[in-house]
Image: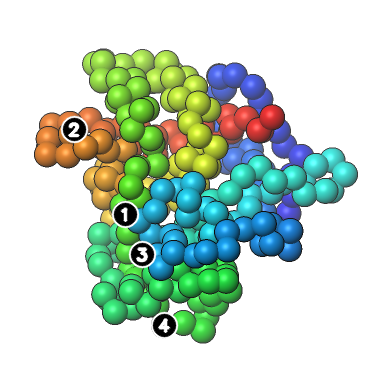
């Protein structure tokens, strides 16, 4: 993957980001395996199910992929981590499923989904060595496992303590789009690193599908309905369809305006 020297400007972006800039921003990241030192320092006792149904921070201890970028000297600099299952399934879906109707709406085979989930929970590689070309999984199998990972997290990608902040930004009607974008940029920067990178990766993936909704039927609205439980939800609103509607609007807005947030990410200290 080619590296780029593009650096996002600080503060609010006043002009819509161009596709060229977005490509430059995202292409500077590489997925690289953990070093031998990382593996040696990893946990020694592995639970039966170390990935699915576990807190994000805990699952990353066992099955993570580094997000790295090259500096001016060509040396790789680690920005953060995302779960292996998210990286592997996300890349597969981008390459194979963007024109498949109902990609995230149609469930896969329960048998194949169990097998795929087991692969992502099996040490020592946790699915890193999975070669899709030698497997018989369908796009719906992969999409279902991707969605299942997010839905089974004990806490959504947007933490509970930020749930109302994300909703309040869009609750006032009519809203000022530029102000809401600025607010969401600030909130995303305040998220824990692991949640921030997972959110940005998922939004990037969903925006790719939304842009091809004429073929895959996955509009930003449809995607927001499907992914709301795993991205922005709260126990106190679990049985409230009215509350779900606002959360879906928040996620739909984040998907539609995803380009702004990708460019505004700040390197860790």
| Snapshot quadrant of residue 23 | top right
Compared with residue 38, is residue 193 higher up or lower down, i.e. above or below? above
Whole-number angstrom distance, CA of label 2 to CA of label 4: 40 Å
Q: Quadrant of the C terminus?
A: top right
Other-residue count near label 2 (Cα within 10 Å), few / some / many at <14 / 14–19 / ≥20:
few
Q: Which residue is mark 3?
A: 145
Whichever of callouts 1 and 4 sits on the residue coming sooner in the sequence is: 4
Q: Secondary structure at mark 2?
A: helix
Task: Identify the colour scheme used.
Answer: rainbow
Q: Which residue is mark 4?
A: 136
Whole-number angstrom distance, CA of label 1 to CA of label 4: 24 Å
Other-residue count near label 4 (Cα within 10 Å), few / some / many at <14 / 14–19 / ≥20:
few
- In the image shown, does 75 or 72 lie closer to the viewer? 75
Q: Which residue is mark 1?
A: 152
> Tags 1 and 4 in contact by the CB under 8 Å rule?
no
Left/right of residue 167 with respect to residue 237 in the rendered view? right
> Tags 1 and 3 in contact by the CB under 8 Å rule?
no
Whichever of callouts 2 and 3 sits on the residue coming sooner in the sequence is: 3
Residue plotted at (54% across, 37% down): 193
Q: Secondary structure at mark 1?
A: helix
Q: Position of residue 135 (x, y in %)?
A: 46, 82
Q: Which residue is mark 2?
A: 236
Whole-number angstrom distance, CA of label 1 to CA of label 3: 10 Å
């Amino acid at each position: 993957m080619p590296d780029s020297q593009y650096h996002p400007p600080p503060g609010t972006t006043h002009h819509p980001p161009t596709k060229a800039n977005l490509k430059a921003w995202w292409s500077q990241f590489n997925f690289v395996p953990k070093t031998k030192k990382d593996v040696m320092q990893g946990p020694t006792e592995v639970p039966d199910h170390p990935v699915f149904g576990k807190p994000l921070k805990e699952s990353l201890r066992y099955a993570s992929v580094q997000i790295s970028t090259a500096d001016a000297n060509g040396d790789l600099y680690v920005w953060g981590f995302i779960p292996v299952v998210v990286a592997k399934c996300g890349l597969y879906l981008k390459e194979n499923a963007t024109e498949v109707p109902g990609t995230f709406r149609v469930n896969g085979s329960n048998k194949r989904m169990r097998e795929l989930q087991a692969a992502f929970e099996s040490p020592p590689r946790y699915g890193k060595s999975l070669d899709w070309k030698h497997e018989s999984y369908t796009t719906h199998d992969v999409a279902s496992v991707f969605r299942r990972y997010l839905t089974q997290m004990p806490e959504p990608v947007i933490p509970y303590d930020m749930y109302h902040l994300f909703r309040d930004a869009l609750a006032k009607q009519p809203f000022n789009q530029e102000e809401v974008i600025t607010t969401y940029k600030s909130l995303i920067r305040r998220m824990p690193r692991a949640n921030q990178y997972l959110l940005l990766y998922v939004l990037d993936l969903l925006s790719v599908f939304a842009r091809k909704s004429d073929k895959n039927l996955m509009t930003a609205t449809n995607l927001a309905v499907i992914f709301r439980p795993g991205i922005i939800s709260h126990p106190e609103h679990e049985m409230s369809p009215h509350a779900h509607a606002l959360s879906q609007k928040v996620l739909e807005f984040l998907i539609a305006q995803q380009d702004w947030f990708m460019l505004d990410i700040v390197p860790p200290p």
